Image: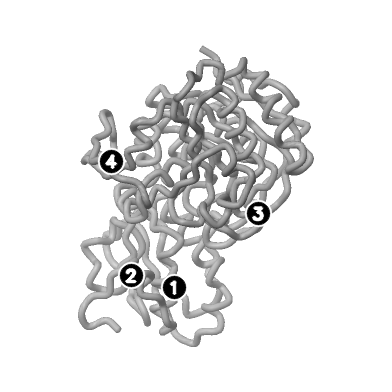
Amino acid sequence: MTEQVALTAVGGDAGVPDGLDRLLDLLGAPLAGLRAGDEVLIKPNLFQTRPGFHVSPALLAAIARVVAEHGARPVIAERTHAIYELLNDHEAAKYARIVSFDDLPLRITGIPGATSLRVPIAVPELILDCDFFIGVPQLRTHASVVYSNAMKNLVGLLPGYTTRIVHMAGVDESTVDLNVMRPQDLVVCDGTTVIEGNYPMDGRAREAGFLAASRNAVALDVAVGTLAGFDPDSVAYLRDAHARGMGPLSLGEIELLGTPLSEVAFDMVKAPVEIVVPRDGIHVYAENACPACSRFVAGAMKALAGELCEWEGEMTVISGPQVELPPLRGEVVLVGNCLYESRDLGIFVEGCPPRAIQLAAFRYAMGKPVGDHERTQFRVPAGVR
């Protein structure tokens, strides 16, 4: 069966309600089957409060309104309490219950067929019990996984500490596992504003002026990624999802509806993939790193370039399996799970790949202060400062 993705151009928040109505019409009224009293989970990306760095509240209000008009009970939920700051006094709160996953009871659940998250994990009960699930991602570049949208938005379903578990287990396969655990019944992508550049280590907001929707998260990610100038086949979690039969991997397998893709397409500024060492004295050995960890190191070198140039010390950064370790000069930072056996040789940054917050390990190596929570994100063995 060919999956459908609907696209429409919008001119800012004022055009969002009509744009949403167009998308739902093009997809054949995907909310028509809602019954009175159904609990509908709406999961946006509202992790940050910085202007432009979250889903448009106007879009959430429009979705919640349509759900409520069907007699269902919309709940807008996201990890962290930023959701209250953004939505409690917004129109969206007129139609939906606003809640943080951090305030909800958890249930231990396994994921049948999981390839990375193979042990039971704690999941908010709302995710497992809701009658209908709507994902509302914001398109973003990503320094480790190429780009983040519908599928990766589900990492935000879990309690804060679980994010670390996801990266330890392998973020690409874990992302797919979470989509196996609770498939999205409808996805509405917010492309009114996107985040481009070296995100989440850095990045900037850019107005792009589109909305997209689909009943299939993989198809939506492929279509929107192509729209923004990405090659979906370069994204490991999309290849994995396709291999598991969850959706298409090429635009040729998707029926595009509404505004022609060419009319909303643009070339998004990508996160760096080439490791550029900012100065002499910073030694990087990542030739054997997996693509995700290599991109993490590339993003770290770009994000920290100014700080590394101001710092007068020497540093050795290693990522990827090593038959023989290179010379360890100055402060040593070991990046990625595959260096676990060498963890006592320097500051060890676990993960496959690590998370942006773990850039604190490099700052710690430079002798800079890091916060208490940041200090938990890397391992410093006895005998190392």
Q: Nearest the camera: 340 or 218?
A: 218
Name the residue that disc number 2 marks: 326
Q: Which residue is mark 3?
A: 52
x, y percent for residue 223 = 61, 30
Farthest residue toward the top?
Answer: 1
- 287 w.r.t. 245: above or below: below
State which tag comes first along the sequence, 4 or 1. Answer: 4
Q: Nearer the viewer, residue 281 or 259?
A: 259
Q: What amino acid type should be assigned to the residue bearing mark 2?
A: Pro
* Residue at disc 4, secondary structure: loop
Measure how far apart labels 2 and 1 are at the Cα level. Answer: 10 Å
- Left or right, 16 with reference to 48: right
Kind of residue indicated by mark 1: His
Q: Secondary structure at mark 3?
A: loop
Amino acid at the residue labelled 4: Leu
User: Does the residue at mark 2 contact the one at mark 1 (Cβ under 8 Å)?
Assistant: yes
Q: Mark 3 to mark 1: distance in Å?
A: 36 Å
N-terminal of the two: label 2 or label 1?
1
- Sequence-wise, the earlier of marks 3 and 2 is 3
**Mark carried by residue 283:** 1
The residue where tag 4 is placed is 117
Image coordinates for residue 127, horizontal then vertical, percent: 37, 36
Q: Nearer the viewer, mark 3 or mark 1?
A: 3
> Which amino acid type corresponds to the residue marked 3 in the rendered image?
Gly
Task: For label 4, count other residues whose C-alpha is less than 10 Å away and answer few (under 14), some (14-19) or many (20+).
Answer: many
Q: Is residue 4 depicted above or below 282 in this figure?
A: above
Task: Name the residue rendered at 56%, 19% in the picture.
Answer: 30
Q: Position of residue 118 (x, y in %)?
A: 23, 38
Q: CA distance from mark 4 to mark 1?
A: 34 Å
- Along the line of sight, which residue is nearer the eye, 86 or 280? 86
